[in-house]
Image: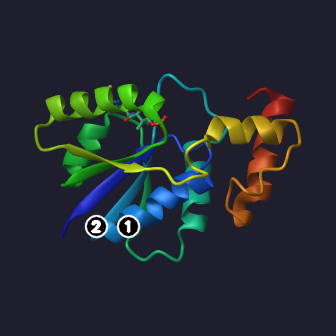
Amino acid sequence: MRTAIYPGSFDPVTCGHLDIIKRAARLFDKLIVLVSVNPTKSSCFTPNERVDLIKRVTRNISNIEVDSYDGLLIDYFNARNADVIVKGLRAMSDFEYEFQMALVNKDLCYDAETIFLCADAVGTFLSSSMVKQIAMFDGDISSYVPSEIEADIKNGVKRLRQTGE
Ligand code: PNS
């Protein structure tokens, strides 16, 4: 059984992430979508909220598990006996950072292979930060996030705007 982990901030999950999730789920027996901590980013949604949003948009995909982890990805990778780390690549600008992380993870654990899936057309310019920015100024995010979580994302961004939390 081949298990892949797709880690990310997912703050919040977008249609670009969902495209990678669907494609990776077809390639592996099991896909763990892992809400992880990126220490360089501040977040809008709590890890539990992000897990809940991902669970709701992936409920029809049977070989997916959604989890969160507040530690080194490689420790989780080893604890779950995973085979592969999956990341999405949007543009060349992503590459240097992703390449560095793949090499660091491989250096920490020789067996940790990272594979990259190219984003689809919309995913290429989409990011969680842009979705939050558009939502913050009441713009239309309906093409960028799954419809069943659109309202929650708008509310989460509004809450951030009101409380600054
Ligand atoms: O969606 P992101 O923010 O690009 O995802 C980055 C993430 C969360 C996958 C990365 O920061 C991560 O793996 N965080 C866990 C800590 C870790 O293992 N860092 C890599 C070694 S420096």
Seen in the image, is 8 located left or right of residue 86? right
Quadrant of the image for the N terminus? bottom left
In the depicted structure, whether residue 56 falls above or below residue 153: below
Residue 154, image x, y percentages: 80, 48
The residue at 72%/66% (across/down) is 148
Residue 157's tag is none
The residue at 78%/34% (across/down) is 160
Q: Which residue is disc 1 drawn over?
A: 25
Q: Amino acid at mark 2?
A: Phe
Residue 122, image x, y percentages: 61, 51
- In terms of depth relative to the viewer, which is nearer, 112 or 35? 112
- Does dot 1 land on a helix, a strand or a loop? helix
Seen in the image, is 27 located left or right of residue 135? left
Residue 7, image x, y percentages: 40, 46
Q: Which residue is disc 2 drawn over?
A: 28
Seen in the image, is 68 located left or right of residue 15? left
Q: Amino acid at mark 1?
A: Ala
Considering every residue shown, the one lying at the far top of the view is 40
Task: Report if the CB atoms under discs 2 and 1 are less than 8 Å apart.
Answer: yes
Number of residues whose C-alpha sits closer than 10 Å to that of mark 2, classed few (under 14), some (14–19) or many (20 or more): some
